[in-house]
């Protein structure tokens, strides 16, 4: 029975780690997208169609 609890503990720790990493990556990519969009808006006058 104790073996099951140890496995559940490891699985829970892994899930928390993956969740934190996904949150950090999501925030990072979101900031990068905002910066890229700002640069596009800034250079909007230079784009010719």
Image (cartoon, rainbow, N blue to C red):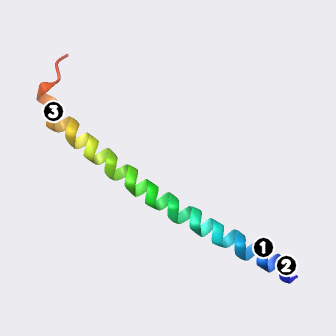
Label 1: which secondary element: helix
Residue drawn 20% across the image and 16% down it:
49
Task: Give me the residue at 51% from left, 61% from top.
Answer: 21
For label 2, the SS is: helix
The label number, if any, that marks residue 40 in the structure image: none
Whether residue 38 sits left or right of residue 11 in the image: it is left
Where does residue 5 sit, x and y in percent of width and height? 79, 79
Residue at image mark 3: 43
35 up-or-down from 15: above or below: above
Q: CA distance from mark 1 to mark 2?
A: 6 Å
Residue 40: which quarter of the image?
top left
Q: Are marks 1 and 3 in contact (CB under 8 Å)?
A: no
Question: Callout 3: few (<14), some (14-19), or many (20+) C-alpha neighbours within 10 Å?
Answer: few
Separation (CA) of disc 3 from disc 2: 60 Å
| Marks 1 and 3, the one that precedes in the sequence | 1
Please give left or right for residue 46 compared with residue 28 in the image: left
- Tell me residue 13's x, y (percent): 64, 72
Q: Position of residue 32 (x, y in %)?
A: 33, 48
Q: Choose the circle earlier in sequence order: 3 or 2.
A: 2
Judged from this view, the residue extending furthest toward the bottom is 2
Q: Which residue is mark 2?
A: 3
Left or right: residue 46 versus residue 36 is left
Q: Residue 18, how many percent across, how many down?
A: 58, 62
Q: Which disc, if any, is residue 7? A: 1
Q: Secondary structure at mark 3?
A: loop
Residue 48 vertical position relative to residue 42 in the rendered view, above or below: above
Quick check: marks 1 and 2 in contact, CB under 8 Å? Answer: yes
Q: Residues within 10 Å of mark 2 (few under 14, many from 20)?
A: few
Question: 10 Å neighbourhood of mark 1: few (<14), some, or many (≥20)?
Answer: few
């Amino acid at each position: 029975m104790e073996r099951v609890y140890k496995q559940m503990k490891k699985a829970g720790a892994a899930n928390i780690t993956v969740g934190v990493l996904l949150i950090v990556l999501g925030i990072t990519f979101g900031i990068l997208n905002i910066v890229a969009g700002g640069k596009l808006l800034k250079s909007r006058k230079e784009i010719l169609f």
